[in-house]
Amino acid sequence: GKGNVIITGASSGLGLATAKALADTEKWHIIMACRNFLKAERAAKSVGITKENYTVMHLDLSSLESVRQFVDTFRRSGRPLDALVCNAAVYLPTAKEPTYTADGFELSVGTNHLGHFLLARLLLDDLKKSDSPQKRLIIVGSITGNTNTLAGNVPPKANLGDLRGLAGGLNGLNSSAMIDGGEFDGAKAYKDSKVCNMLTMQEFHRRYHEETGVTFSSLYPGCIATTGLFREHIPLFRLLFPPFQKYITKGYVSEEEAGKRLAQVVSDSSLTKSGVYWSWNKNSASFENQLSQEASDAEKARKLWEVSEKLVGLA
Ligand code: NDP
């Protein structure tokens, strides 16, 4: 039969393009894990994913209760789980003040990192039970959190510091809303959350790859300048960013191409190595990319894991 893959944030952008690419192979049933049911249904229709190839299930990553409910709903569906793609994200570059999740965490890190952290931890048990020979857990990363690249050096740079803000609950009350304890900066909060995503993937690999046989991967699919991710940005930025990426940095990829890349990480039999951060060269060939010093700091990854466990109620 078909493999079952959960994709968070499959209602637009990269998640939707990946769902489409996998559905077209006729080898996958896609569970679209989305916060807006109607939008997800419409999105699936708009790209021509056929009814028998997908199911929409409600998931709001900015609520730990919703994450737990999603896992229950998925288990009650009786489907085995062969792959999980943690893709959804929010980006609030123009926010002057922090906003918060249902549990009181700054919204970007709370959604992009903590929501996915709980989801992935809970669903690891389901992945373990699958009898598929190629079980995969993928957390979408980004170049912007990666300070060993040009794009990652555009200020404000990602920096998790000693995690004091996160350890304090990231709530803007008795702790800072920023992981490093600094002043709120929406663009930096997003980049920090992406560093967390890449550290989490590697910590999963170190803790669970041998025991479970699950392949853990992250990736930078290229700059998909047309997605909804930039919807909060100022209009002039939204106008100029796609041509800038296309003609100046040449990092531009279409949503369709980016979706094909992520679909490869889900199902290509040549991308089975665990603990890898994948990227693609100009000819769209995949290669194992290098992470920045902070994004590959094993000690920080361990600490992030432990602090995150406490915040989401797993420890
Ligand atoms: P989009 O904004 O198009 O997609 C983000 C998705 O996340 C949407 O489906 C959105 O749902 C969903 N989402 C947001 N908040 C929540 C929530 N609380 N619960 C559940 N789902 C939520 O952006 P992209 O497709 O560009 O981003 C996808 C991934 O790609 C992200 O991880 C991003 O960091 C990464 N990425 C993007 C790059 C780019 O250039 N665009 C470059 C590198 C990485 P809804 O449809 O309801 O809004």
Image (tube, rainbow, N blue to C red):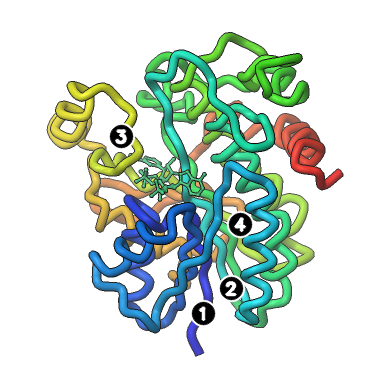
Residue drawn at (53%, 76%) of the image: 4
The structure residue drawn at horizontal position 30% and vertical position 63%, both measured from the top left corner, is: 42
The answer to which of marks 4 and 1 sits earlier in the sequence is: 1
Quadrant for residue 105, please give it: top right
Mark 3 residue type: Arg
Dot 2: what SS?
loop
The disc labelled 1 sits on which kind of residue? Gly
Identified by mark 2, the residue type is Asp
**Mark 1 closeness class: few <14, some 14–19, many ≥20 residues within 10 Å:** some
Q: Does the residue labelled 3 lie within 8 Å of ligand 1?
A: yes
Q: Which of marks 1 and 3 is nearer the N terminus?
A: 1
- Horizontal side of residue 242 vs 267, given as left or right: left
Q: Do the residues labelled 2 and 3 touch (CB within 8 Å)?
A: no
Ligand number 1: quarter of image: top left
Query: Is residue 261 visible to the viewer in this orientation of the structure?
Result: no
Residue 231 is marked as 3
* Residue beneath the point at 51% across and 70% down: 5
- Residue 29: x %, y % from top left: 46, 77
Which mark lies nearer to you, 3 or 4? Answer: 3
Disc 1 residue: CB within 8 Å of ligand 1: no
Q: Where is residue 209 in the image (x, y as percent from the top left)?
A: 71, 60
Q: Quadrant of residue 175?
A: top right
Mark whose residue sits in front, 2 or 3: 3
In this figure, which residue is indicated by the disc labeled 2?
Answer: 82
- From the viewer's perspective, is 244 left or right of 255? left
Q: Name the residue under label 4.
A: 216
Question: Does residue 184 appear in the picture of this structure?
Answer: yes
- Where is mark 1, residue-wise? 3
Q: Is mark 1 in CB contact (under 8 Å) with mark 2?
A: yes
- SS type, badge 3: loop
Q: In this view, does 193 lie above or below 209?
A: above
